[in-house]
Image (tube, rainbow, N blue to C red):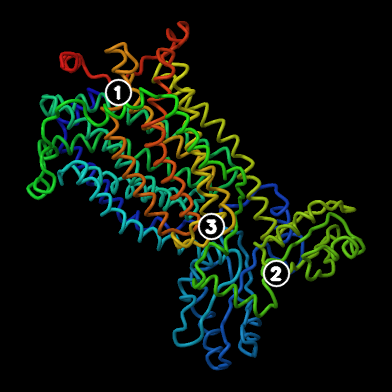
Amino acid sequence: MDRLERLITRRRRLVLIVWLVIVVVSIPFAGRQTENLTGGGFETAGSGSQVVADALGSDFEGQQAESLSVVIDNRAGDAAKLAAAVDRVQREGFEDVDAVRLDPAAAEAAKASTDPIVIMPLIVEGDRDEAVDAASLMREHLHTGEAGDDLPVHLLGQSALWAGIQELSKEDLEQAEIIGLPIVLIILLFVFGSLAAAALPLALGVTSVVVTGAIVFFLSQVYGMSTFVTNMASMLGIGVAVDYSLFILARYREELENGLSPAEAREVAMRTSGMAVTFSGVTVIVALAGLFLIDAKVVQSMAVGAIVVVGIAVIAAVTLLPALIAALGHRVSRPGKIIGRIKPKPKPKEGPGFWERWTAMLMRRPLPFALAATALMLLIASPALVLKENTAAIAMFPEDFETRVGFELAAQQLGGEGALGPIQLVFDGTNVDGFVASDIEPLPGVKAVTPGVPSRDGKKTLVVVTPDESPESESTLALVDRLRDIRAPVTMHIGGATAQNQDDTAVISGSLWKVAVFVVLLSYLVLLVVLRSVILPLKAVLMNALSVAAAYGVLVMVFQWGWFDSVTGFNSLGYVQAITPALLLAVVFGLSMDYEVFMLSRIKERFHATGDTQKAVSQGLAASAKTISSAALIMVAVFAIFAGTGVPQVKEIGVGLAVAIALDATVVRLVLVPTTMQLMGDFNWWIPKWLDRRLPDMDFESSPTKQEEVVTAA
């Protein structure tokens, strides 16, 4: 790290030019990153719903795995406008679209229709992802939902749903970034009191997001990636990049205040906080890699986006940031004229500071404070015991969004929402009519059942069940459960939107324990090496688990129970999106490692200097608490902004991360860490001698010899 810092200082102009070129080249590609993203990615290979989807496309005449239709609102009964709308669909809707086409006979039938809601079925010749991409293009070409010179046109089907989510997510991302960046800048101004210093972390955040956007564009050419990647990368990238640069910049300014020259301060900041940031970033990346244990493309692609943006943030923090610090010199430590008047220079301290007094108060009564903090976290986490997961899509749209409006119009025309999500049963055999009549038709929630359709080879049978209610309703979910419990005379596979929803949810939630084991073991091993203690890593893992559990509890309160709908303006769905818990687990454990390494390494440094646990905790907490609190405040602000602007999926991630980081940086870091360390005393640092000899020496926050002498003398 010393060699890197010296190289960057000598070649800072070259480093700045290289980064400028990278950003300039990345901007046009970052602007196109959503072109090849897909709203799908929830498919579960080998599941019953996937078996049915494959069979529909290959074994049954006139059937298709994906259903997509055009819905035209002709309640005004204007035949001329209806004909014009159909012509517009034929003329403009299929430009550059290969996976979907319109049968001319269906178009002529639509023109002659007298129905108030006209539904034109489309022929889908591609797979699910291709159908979603086609629906996205058609939405753009047809300006769906807008009346124009003829009638409003909507798209209907699961592919249309995910295409709509894709567009809505893009709009929300733009709004979140426009609102979020100025707020982050204001917080940084009050943290540093210098516009130059405040601009640096923000510049790194923007740089990380832009470069990641370009990388996502190129990755999406060869690897299927979910539309949620952009929101995840932007949300995490701004927060992480600002945090990492804040840690290094705060240490640099601290060393300047201790009397070091700018060159010496940069060296200390890089070899301490710079090294800690690098190690923490790698740890976050490895924790996120645990998401690949979930066999769902939507989760894995979001993990890819998060890994890339964290990696770029780390590289920028240890190369671009020191070059900018070297170029700006004292301007990053001196307040400007305006900021200087708003935030005058603090007076010299007399007596112990706030954090010393806070720690002393905790140390006098560590057990009551530790028990109270633990009880609070467990209370917040308790609703997680009834966490309910789902991957439904329709309810994610605002009520006036055109995709949802189109579904409601189609439901009116078809006599109920159940017709929008039929349950498809594929039997590996024939002669099932009697079983269907006796065991399926009488089931609660069944509205209609079609006669069995034989496959091309005559060895399979397709039966379509129309439920009473929508494919995402409790009634239809219960119906699919009943069908799964029935013992059929031959093998029966269950497909359709509801079954796919259940299969996807089962795969994602069923893999959560794998991610948990991976992340917990990784976190423990990392902290074992960094802290050279058997006990402290165990305590840290348990506290991180408390933060995650509390975040789950808040998700249940907000999105499942809807306790705060009147305050937040959210419309609770009655469940939590299935991918949210896994993402929160990996991201929160990774981000908590930043604060854990930053704080406990400072405490460890002071313990080695004083040999007194209480003094070490007090001094280490005083040295790191302000920076951690500032970093957490920025993280919470960024996540809260996304929570306020995103679709429910993004809202959940934003709320969960904001809650977890807020609790981790306050209740955990400022209460549980010091009190439990006081209770354990010297046992904090226990490690078997044989293990101590074999571990590498990873000392991130100890200053070089000259600085140690300054601190010791003080």
Which circle marks residue 562 in the picture?
A: 3
Give the distance between the C-alpha atoms of the residues marked 1 and 2, in whole angstroms. Answer: 63 Å
Res 595 quadrant in image: top left
Q: In terms of sequence position, does the residue under pointer 2 or pointer 3 come before the other?
A: 2
Q: Nearer the viewer, residue 153 or 519?
A: 519
Crowding near the residue tagged with mark 3, few <14, some 14–19, many ≥20 C-alpha atoms within 10 Å: some
Give the distance between the C-alpha atoms of the residues marked 3 and 1, in whole angstroms. Answer: 41 Å
Q: Does the CB distance between marks 2 and 3 fall below 8 Å?
A: no
Which circle marks residue 486 in the picture?
A: none
Left-right relation of 325 to 144: left
- Residue 151 makes an appearance in the image: yes
Q: Nearer the viewer, residue 366 or 441?
A: 366
Amino acid at the residue labelled 2:
Gly
* Residue 126: x %, y % from top left: 61, 62
- Residue 605 makes an appearance in the image: no
Left-right relation of 424 to 144: right
Q: Is residue 356 above or below residue 443?
A: above
